[in-house]
Amino acid sequence: MTARPHDLLRLAGSAAAGAELPGWAAASLAACGWAVVRRAPHPPGLIPIGVRGPRRSQRHAAFVPAGEVTRRVPPEKLNRPHPRGPHLPAALPATMFAALPAALCDTLSAVGLRLAEELGCEAVWGPVGSVGFELATGHQVTHPSSDLDLLVRTPRRLSPATAARLVTAFAALPSRIDCQLETPRGGIGLAEWARTGGPVLARTAHGPELVDDPWGRA
């Protein structure tokens, strides 16, 4: 299995067996057996995961054997609600989330953002964070003031000018959007890249790093 940061993983019931988990984390996995892939160095055969609890402060880092994963849901699978899939987050404004995919795509088009043309390859996006978790699992973790966290995979350079147009477009949507670009050097904030064009803080498997060019050689 190739698991990438922000992918959501459905774990077998025995996944946490023998792991040293806080009581709240063990209870969370028992109630909702899903975890998110995090960035961290890891031995072959193990996947670094984050277990979320009912409170925002409750996040626990752990590792799970790849063989204990029964399903993987990447963010890009969640940008179009499926008729037979999980319900949209109940705690959030229904009109916003019912129209979100169309509104976002229309917004991208309106600002002239043609990622496939600029990047020269396919670019994909999807919700992450609490909204992505709830869409994938059906387990309610959002609340009315939740932000919408988005991930856009940009394997090739996205110009700061295009990033700035996207930031402006997101500002017109009916919820606060926090967007991260997934680059070859790690995850960077869309707003920071739009504002500075580098150097920017990149989230990597070895921790945060300040990089001049997220698409350049390490």
Image: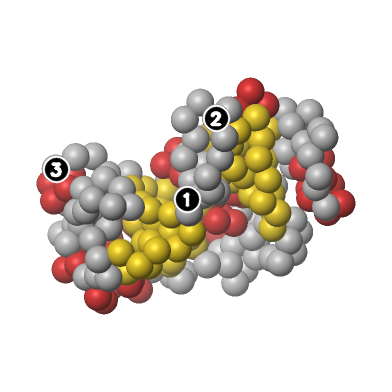
CB within 8 Å, label 3 to label 1: no
Label placed on residue 176: none
In front here: 112 or 115? Answer: 115
CB within 8 Å, label 2 to label 3: no
* 117 versus 197 height, above or below: above
Question: What's the residue type where badge 3 is placed?
Answer: Gly
Please name the residue that numbered disc 1 is placed on. Answer: 205
In front here: 79 or 95? Answer: 79
Labels 3 and 1: the sequence-earlier one: 3
Q: CA distance from mark 1 to mark 2?
A: 14 Å
Q: Is residue 105 left or right of residue 151?
A: left
Q: Give neighbour class at mark 2: few <14, some 14-19, many 20+ (Cα, 10 Å).
A: few
Q: Give neighbour class at mark 3: few <14, some 14-19, many 20+ (Cα, 10 Å).
A: few
* 84 versus 114 height, above or below: above
CB within 8 Å, label 1 to label 2: no
Q: CA distance from mark 3 to mark 1?
A: 26 Å
What residue lies at 51% left-to-right and 26% top-to-bottom? Answer: 1
The spot of residue 24 in percent (x, y) is: 83, 54
The spot of residue 82 in percent (x, y) is: 49, 36
Please name the residue that numbered disc 2 is placed on. Answer: 44
Question: What's the residue type where badge 2 is placed?
Answer: Pro
Q: Which structural element holds mark 3? A: loop
Quarter of the image for residue 188 reads: bottom left
In front here: 56 or 187? Answer: 187
What residue lies at 66% left-to-right and 35% top-to-bottom? Answer: 64
Please name the residue that numbered disc 3 is placed on. Answer: 120
In front here: 86 or 26? Answer: 26
